[in-house]
């Protein structure tokens, strides 16, 4: 049983090593996929920031035009009623309309810029996530290789210990308690003499 046990231990170590490599490859593949998704999200957030600014510009222009139309309508109404436009309460009304229009335009632009900044922050976060996922993919491959190496080295060490024990007990040379196992490879073409 000693030779078979040693061989099975070595085979188990080999399978463990292969499993570590495949696990590392699988994990790296998942990390690369997540990196691609994060990069796509970063690209979309960048486009969303540009759209937010464009929408803010359009809305600000619309608010400015509406304010200008309101001011024009006020002036026309006051002029039709014979009110002097350049002083007194008529001037105060025009100034208030202009100030309200300016505040509306500034508020629209501020909100658009704030949305764009939020999207730009998302770009940074997604870029960082993509970079971390790429590093994790590299680490997964390395981790799988290191796990495989550890498994193979451990298995080789156990095999060598068992082999030495069998050799010391004489099991490999036809003497000793396990003499019947010296022929474990008989008929297979494997020559173990001299090991």
Image: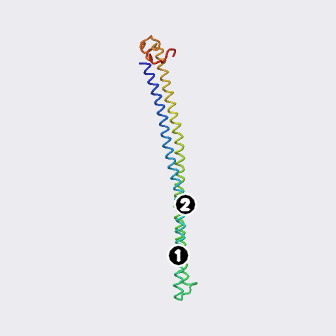
Above or below: residue 91 compared with residue 157: below
In what quadrant of the picture does the N terminus appear? top left
Instruction: Give the alpha-carbon distance from disc 2 to disc 1, as whole Å.
Output: 26 Å
Q: Is disc 1 placed on a helix, strand or loop?
A: helix
Q: Nearer the viewer, residue 23 or 118?
A: 23
Specify which label sits upstream in the sequence, 2 or 1. Answer: 2
Q: Which residue is mark 2?
A: 50
Q: Which residue is mark 1?
A: 67
Q: Determine the residue located farthest toward the bottom in the rendered image.
A: 82
Q: Position of residue 23 (x, y in %)?
A: 47, 37
Q: Position of residue 11 (x, y in %)?
A: 46, 26
Q: Determine the residue located farthest toward the top in the rendered image.
A: 175
Above or below: residue 120 compared with residue 36: below
Using the rendered view, name the quadrant where residue 72 is placed: bottom right
Is 53 on the left or on the right of 4, as rendered?
right
Q: Is disc 2 placed on a helix, strand or loop?
A: helix
Q: Position of residue 10 (x, y in %)?
A: 47, 25
Q: How many marks?
A: 2
Above or below: residue 18 compared with residue 2: below
Q: Nearer the viewer, mark 2 or mark 1?
A: 2
Q: Position of residue 118 (x, y in %)?
A: 52, 58
Q: Residues within 10 Å of mark 2 (few under 14, many from 20)?
A: some
Q: Nearer the viewer, residue 19 or 91?
A: 19
| Residue located at (52% from left, 64% from top) | 112
Q: What label sits on residue 16 in the rendered view? A: none
């Amino acid at each position: 049983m000693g030779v078979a046990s040693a061989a099975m231990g070595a085979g188990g170590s080999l399978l463990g090593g292969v499993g570590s490599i495949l696990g590392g490859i699988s994990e790296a593949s998942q990390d690369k996929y997540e990196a691609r998704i994060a990069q796509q999200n970063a690209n979309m957030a960048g486009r969303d920031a540009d759209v937010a600014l464009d929408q803010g510009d359009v809305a600000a222009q619309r608010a400015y035009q509406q304010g200008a139309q309101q001011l024009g309508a006020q002036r026309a109404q006051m002029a039709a009623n014979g009110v002097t436009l350049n002083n007194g309460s008529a001037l105060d009304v025009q100034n208030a309309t202009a100030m309200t229009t300016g505040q509306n335009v500034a508020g629209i632009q501020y909100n658009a810029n704030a949305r764009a900044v939020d999207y730009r922050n998302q770009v940074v976060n997604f870029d960082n996530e993509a970079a971390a996922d790429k590093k994790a993919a590299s680490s997964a491959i390395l981790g799988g290789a290191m796990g495989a190496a550890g498994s193979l080295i451990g298995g080789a060490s156990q095999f060598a210990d068992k082999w030495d024990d069998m050799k010391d007990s004489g099991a490999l040379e036809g003497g000793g308690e396990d003499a019947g196992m010296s022929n474990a490879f008989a008929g297979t073409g494997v020559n173990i003499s001299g090991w």
